[in-house]
Amino acid sequence: MSIHFTVSGLTRNLIHSLGLDHEWPKALTPEQKLLVECYLAGQIPESAWNDYVFEMPELERHVNARRGRH
């Protein structure tokens, strides 16, 4: 048996305001993990990091999760 329901806009806004709708980052490849580690260590300049994030948005989600932000 399965239960299906829709979420109204009000409920969606409530969930968002409580911070319960954040998306968990997908697992990274070994190369992506290395990029994140290098960026967090200050070894990748912002301009280059922005290029990486443009191509792979999940990198930013991992950095934000590591820094405790959602």
Image: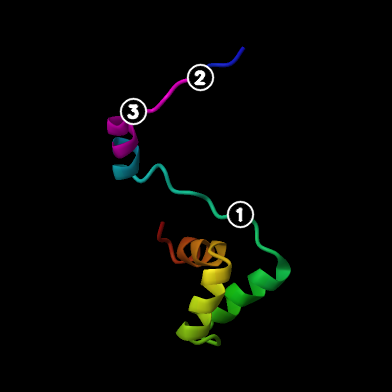
Tell me the amino acid under the disc marked 3. Answer: Ser
Give the tally of numbered discs.
Answer: 3
Quickly name the residue at label 1.
Answer: 26
The image quarter in which residue 37 lies: bottom right
The image quarter in which residue 33 lies: bottom right
| Crowd around label 3: few <14 · some 14–19 · many ≥20 (10 Å) | few
Tell me the amino acid under the disc marked 1. Answer: Lys
Front residue of 38/45: it is: 45
The local secondary structure at tag 3 comes to: loop
- Which of label 1 and label 3 is nearer to you? 3
**Side of 66 relative to 11 (left or right):** right
Q: Which residues are magenta?
A: 5-13
Q: Residue furthest top?
A: 1
Q: Is residue 31 at all visible to an observer of this figure?
A: yes
Mark 1 and mark 3 residues within 8 Å of each other at the beta carbon: no
Residue 8, x across and y down, in percent: 33, 28
Q: Which residue is found at the position 61% from the left and 54% from the top?
A: 26
**Side of 47 relative to 16 (left or right):** right
- Which of label 1 and label 2 is nearer to you? 2
